[in-house]
Amino acid sequence: QKEVEQNSGPLSVPEGAIASLNCTYSDRGSQSFFWYRQYSGKSPELIMFIYSNGDKEDGRFTAQLNKASQYVSLLIRDSQPSDSATYLCAVKGSARQLTFGSGTQLTVLP
Amino acid sequence: DGGITQSPKYLFRKEGQNVTLSCEQNLNHDAMYWYRQDPGQGLRLIYYSQIVNDFQKGDIAEGYSVSREKKESFPLTVTSAQKNPTAFYLCASSMTSGRLETQYFGPGTRLLVL
């Protein structure tokens, strides 16, 4: 079992829709959870982090964390073509290092 | 401008050759990291350093070496022992350890084998 799992996609949504990206993790001692966006050929850029159960909103982005279910998600409201990228989930586990999922490729169709 | 710089952007390695990738940061971050990314995959940790003159192996350290002589610099050497070095190499840094540690990435170096 992979430590951090994401659906590889590709996930396609129409412009203006809500994109939902999901991530599960295996280490119950995990403390912090991060979402990075990576455009093709570029390095990852941080979108959000979350460490408490519940929702955290930042503009069009909402991160959701459920530690009991070992599940973290990212919602992108009013999706734009510029949101088309690979989204990486990263988890800081009990070993205190980040473990990355393989990413979900999102395409927003105009 | 504060940030993380990596050079070169592209690097070509001949068989049997050691090559060194540069990573510099002026963010006054204590911790620095090297990751490798293969196509369609996530990032895998090669080495990390939390203070000057100290570093630890990550998940895939074999065939790589690092040094941390200055807070600002964390070069990675890909040795001839690394038999499959073609990948995108990413350097990252963070200000603090602990739960809220947030890693920021440089632009990356793409290594290709001739």
Image: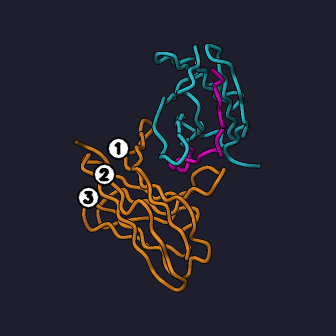
Chain colours: A cyan, B orange
Q: Which marked residue is nearer to the observer: mark 3 or mark 1?
A: 3
| Residue toward you, B46 or B22 | B22
Q: Amino acid at mark 2?
A: Asp
In the displayed structure, does residue A34 sit left or right of residue A75?
A: left
> For the N terminus of chain B, which image quadrant?
top left
Assign a secondary structure to mark 3: loop
**First in residue order: circle 1 vs circle 2:** 2
Q: Which mark is first along the chain, 1 or 3? A: 3
Residue beneath disc 3: B71
Hey, what amino acid is under mark 3? Lys
Instruction: State the image coordinates of residue A44 (x, y, percent, origin top left).
Output: 49, 43
Gap in Å between the C-alphas at discs 1 and 2?
7 Å
Q: Does the residue at mark 1 contact the one at mark 2 (Cβ under 8 Å)?
A: yes
How many callouts does the rendering have?
Answer: 3
Region in magenta: A93-110
What is the crowding at mark 2: few (fewer than 14 residues within 10 Å), some, or many (at least 20)? Answer: some
Mark 2 highlights which residue?
A: B30
Q: Crowding near pointer 1: few (<14 within 10 Å), some, many (20+)?
A: some
In front of the other: B80 or B8: B8
Give the CA distance from mark 3 to mark 1: 13 Å
Answer whether residue B100 is magenta in the image.
no
Residue displayed at 65% across by 46% down: A102
* Amino acid type, callout 1: Thr
Disc 3 from disc 2: Cα separation = 7 Å
Assign a secondary structure to mark 1.
loop
Is the residue under label 2 in contact with that under label 3 (CB below 8 Å)? Answer: yes
Left or right: B20 as drawn, with respect to B110: left
Q: Chain of mark 1?
A: B
Farthest residue toward the front?
A: A110
